[in-house]
Amino acid sequence: MNISKNLRASFLLSALLFASCGIINNLTTRNWHGGDVGGHNYATFDEMNGRQDFKLLNPASGDFTLKYTSEVTEGELRLVITQGHNTIVNRDLTGSVRDSVRIGNGGNPDVKISITGKHARGKYDITYPTSK
């Protein structure tokens, strides 16, 4: 297969740019094991640097309770839950946390969750009821 010099150079430059962005921003995650299924988002990790965003999958209609737990032995982990433009939760999950929050439907069921780690080691678990 004959690839032109320009195409090879473009590929090499793109690869270098992507690699350098990861190095500059120090966005690394090691041994991430987790999942995101309706009603459950969870992960364990040896080191998390960066942010994981997700939207609730098929949440229950009306008001419901979202439960979250975390065990973070090193670094920092932050949880932000938003519904539309409103921030419902913005808290540090470092250490051992077990809590819940009531989510109101309020005509805006669009709930988003962000987990941000800074050299974090540990795990988190988020559960919520889904519509049947």
Image (cartoon, rainbow, N blue to C red):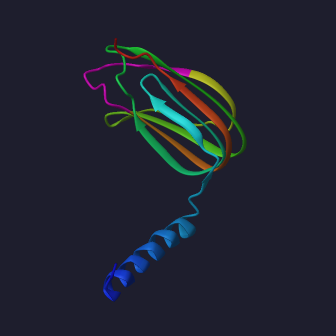
**108 horizontally vs 65: left or right:** left
- In this view, the residue farthest toward the top is 132
Front residue of 59 and 15: 15
Q: Quadrant of the N terminus?
A: bottom left
For residue 131, what is the image quadrant? top left
- In this view, the residue farthest toward the bottom is 5
- In this view, the residue farthest toward the left is 107
Q: Would residue 116 be visible to someone looking at this image? A: yes
Please say if 117 is above or below 67. below
Where residue 120 appears, as percent x and y from the top left, is 66, 47
Where residue 33 appears, as percent x and y from the top left, is 59, 39
Question: Is 34 covered by the magenta stretch?
Answer: no
Q: Would residue 90 be visible to someone looking at this image? A: no
Where residue 93 appears, as percent x and y from the top left, is 62, 36
Q: Quadrant of the C terminus?
A: top left
Front residue of 12 and 79: 12
Q: Residue at x 37, y 21 (%)?
A: 59
For residue 25, what is the image quadrant? bottom right
Question: Is 103 covered by the magenta stretch?
Answer: yes
Q: Residue at x 27, y 26 (%)?
A: 108
- Give the residues drawn in magenta, as a range: 100-111
**58 horizontally vs 102: left or right:** left
**68 horizontally vs 83: left or right:** right
